[in-house]
Amino acid sequence: MAKSPETEHPVKAFGWAARDPSAHFSPFNFSRRATGERDVQVKVLYCGVCHSDLHMAKNEWGLTQYPIVPGHEITGIVTEVGSKVEKFKVGDKVGVGCMVGSCRECDQCTNDLENYCSNFILTYSSRYTDGTVTYGGYSDTVVADEHFVIRWPENLPLDAGAPLLCAGITTYSPLRYYGLDKPGLHIGVVGLGGLGHVAVKFAKAFGSKVTVISTSINKKKEAIERLGADSFLVSRDQEAMQAAAGTLDGIIDTVSASHPLLPLISLLKPHGKMVLVGAPEKPLELPVFPMIIGRKVIGGSAIGGLKETQEMIDFAAKHNILPDVEIIPIDYINTAMDRLLKSDVKYRFVIDIAKSLKPE
């Protein structure tokens, strides 16, 4: 008979879990594996709340294994290291992002692109190499192979910096890979939420001119005055959109709701690139003709490999790039999820695990 989550491993752990697609969270006792020779055990101090956590808690992508303890924007302090660990010592500040394993042998892995390995292991609701389910950072402790742990810069706050481990790398990686990181380029950012507001900050740090594209005029002041965008377009304003046609070198589209692509493709210059990083549930319609006549490219991008994630964290620390966050206690998580569903957060919730998570 299969062991229960509480007894399958030797190290006691405590967190909050959702047990079915109602996505209601409540306290949950479970266990973590003993620290292996290349493992790092981390006391979780903070954990960001990503929109993926909500999708997964509701099983909207059909991948969820209940009970689910989400959280893949984890920061904390190393409490134990295995005998062969070389990169970390007890007391180090670290981060754990969206993945905790991969095959380490395929072309993707050997090129520091573990995120594109066909056998990569998610930080939560995935199967680890020992066959047990992974649990995320809405918990007091995590254990991960040192390869999947990020060194945390001394000058980067552990609380506000936590969402960089998902929202940060999800926007940094496509800007770099698609060559949209050159000074003087004009970059559009579609959607001003958890991903979009970080995309604006990275693009500005790369020296780009940035236009935010949103359905809501209400976000204009915030985009320009607070986040440093250069201009703002309301996507429903046909006149303004037509006036801006052919002005953008690249677009990072962060919207996860269904939306038309044609108006956005029209904003691109010839040879422009639009990268989708939001994940709409239903397929989007792709207008091919304007792509052919403008030699335009539509691509995708998913998080980043470990080497690039470390590079992104170091870049953020150097350029003082931090997500805008609202710190919450763990027992607020159900309210936070309700608010997240309504986009009622500027721009990322971060759970103060150390102060608020108390075993029952």
Image: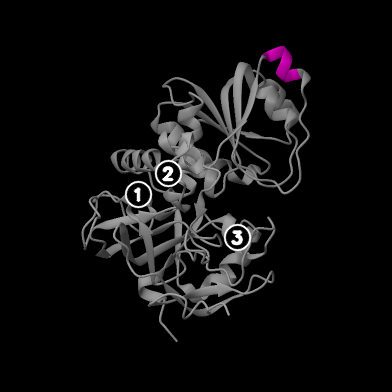
In the rendered structure, are the residues bearing label 2 and label 1 in contact, judged by CB atoms less than 8 Å apart?
yes
Task: Specify how the rendered protein is coloured.
Answer: one colour
Q: Does any portion of residue 222 appear in the rendered image? A: no
Q: CA distance from mark 2 to mark 1?
A: 10 Å
Q: Does any portion of residue 332 appear in the rendered image? A: yes
Q: CA distance from mark 1 to mark 3?
A: 31 Å
Mark toward the viewer: 3 or 2 = 2
Residue under label 1, please give it. Answer: 147
Mark toward the viewer: 2 or 1 = 2
Q: Which mark is first along the chain, 2 or 3?
A: 2
Element type where label 1 sits in the image: helix
Residue at 48% x, 31% y is 175
Residue under label 3, please give it. Answer: 340
Within the magenta stretch, is there residue 140?
no
Residue at 45% x, 44% y is 168
Q: Which mark is residue 104?
A: 2
Image quarter of the C terminus: bottom left
